[in-house]
Image: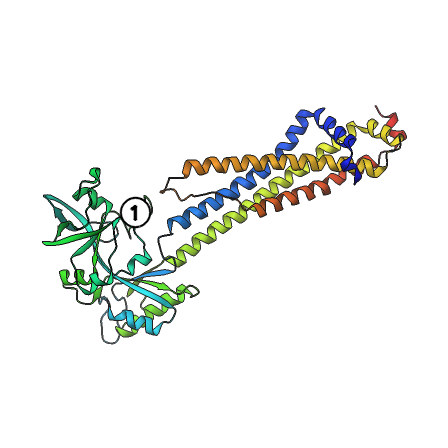
Amino acid sequence: MNIIFKSDTWQEIYHSLRNNKLRTFLTMIGVGWGMFLFVSLLGAAKGMENGFNKLFSNFATNSIFLWAQNTSIPFDGFPKGRKTEIRLPDIDLLEKKIPEIDYISPQNSRGDFGTPTEKMSRNGKTASYTLTGDYPIGNKISAKKLIYGRYLNDADISGNKNVAVIGEEVYKNFFDAKKNENPIGKSFNIKGIFFNVIGVFRVKQGGGGGMNNDKTVFIPLSTFTKMYNDGDRVGFFAIVSKPNADLTMVEDKVKLTLKDKYRISPEDTNAYGSFNLGKEFSKLTGFLTGMQLLTIIVGTLTILAGVIAISNILLITVKERTKEIGIRRALGAKPAEVRNQILLESVVITLTSGMMGFLFGILLLMVVNILTKDQDSFPFYNPTVNYGQVFTAMAVMVILGLIIGMIPAQRAVSIRPIEALRSE
């Protein structure tokens, strides 16, 4: 392969490509476009994955949310339609019976899923918001971004304290947000009871859903149950499994354990409702993985089509240079030298166009990243590419260029000097 280090070889390649500028440019577009698609689509798929990971970063994705409904099957002397329930003592029962459970957070709410129902007031201003009784551990399942103060702690629960963590919208309504009024330690009224503000949280646009929103007020669950005389009844459990546990199996075990305790038919599918966040998150990650795989396939096939186009162009080039090749052969050029030059042209075109596609793809991802950097409502963040995959694609592309370049190279070698000199 000493031909690579000869300046004459590179001069001939340069003149060959320069003499066919339009053809060379159009040929390079095929491979360049393939690499551009490969890089940009791979980066976009990664950006979506990063975006959804960021969107769910404040949630324990290996969690189940379970609540009581009505029975749909008569059982053990009880009619169907009986209202089921879950209670605080069920937490110890479930954690004892199901070792795959990491921890359980109970909650009670008035005005669930973004439908404010509880009237609250301060200094003559009155509005309805969602009121939720929570435990400190609830913040591990759905973390709140605090802009003032702190979240609930164990002392608030044990002391049945009248303290509250309020959403940013509640803060803006009851306090002077324009002057950055510090609300910590100041009070407002809920159902005739004064609560002191201990924290203010913010939910990023698009990131709260119905579980958390800026129109929610969190108070200790112990205080909540006293206000509404709920005893030990709970609205729902947020159940987090251990890292390697089968979340669907945990969900089934939880329901069967509760059905057994409260004398409900094991076949009753309506007695307890649930939402398996882990299962839905797995579907999402599977979809994103599929997108990345599809991107790799589409990009690879596009690159392959471009490399094949290079082979076709080089075949035409060889035909046009028949006389030139004949003269070189007559002057003593070895077949290997002629073959290697054609192969080198194929590699040069392939590698140059691939690098251009790669650079344009990276540039596009940089522009998209700048445009979507602060768009929290759009699940897209930091689109990057795996350089290992890109360089592997580049290497495969060059190898394909060599393999497919053998066709025009062999065609050039097969030309007999005497016949080439006779050609017009």
Quarter of the picture holding the C terminus: top right
Tell which of 12 and 254 is nearer to you: 12
Instruction: Indicate the amino acid at tag 1.
Output: Val
Q: Where is residue 114 in the image (x, y as percent from the top left)?
A: 25, 49
Residue found at x 25% / y 55%: 151
Number of marks drawn? 1
Residue under the image location 34 percent in, 74 percent down: 97
Query: Is 65 placed above or below 215 here?
Result: below
Q: Residues within 10 Å of mark 1 (few under 14, many from 20)?
A: some
Q: Tell me if residue 408 can be seen.
A: no
In the rendered image, residue 29, in percent from the top left (x then y), is placed at: 61, 32
Residue placed most toward the observer, 142 or 271: 142
- Asked if residue 323 is positioned above or below residue 263 in the image, the reply reads above
**Quarter of the figure that contains the N terminus:** top right
Q: Which residue is drawn at 57% across and 45% down?
A: 387
> Which residue, given by chain and number where applicable, does mark 1 sit on?
203
The residue closer to the viewer here, 72 or 329, is 329
Per the image, label 1 sits on a secondary structure element best described as loop
Question: Residue 193 in the image: x percent, y percent?
Answer: 11, 55
Q: In this view, does 42 lie to the left or right of 194?
A: right
Residue 259 falls in image quadrant = bottom left
Q: Is residue 366 left or right of residue 178?
A: right
Residue 17 falls left or right of residue 81? right
Q: Percent from the top left, x then y, of residue 30?
A: 62, 34
Q: Would you identify the image quadrant in which residue 360 lies?
A: top right
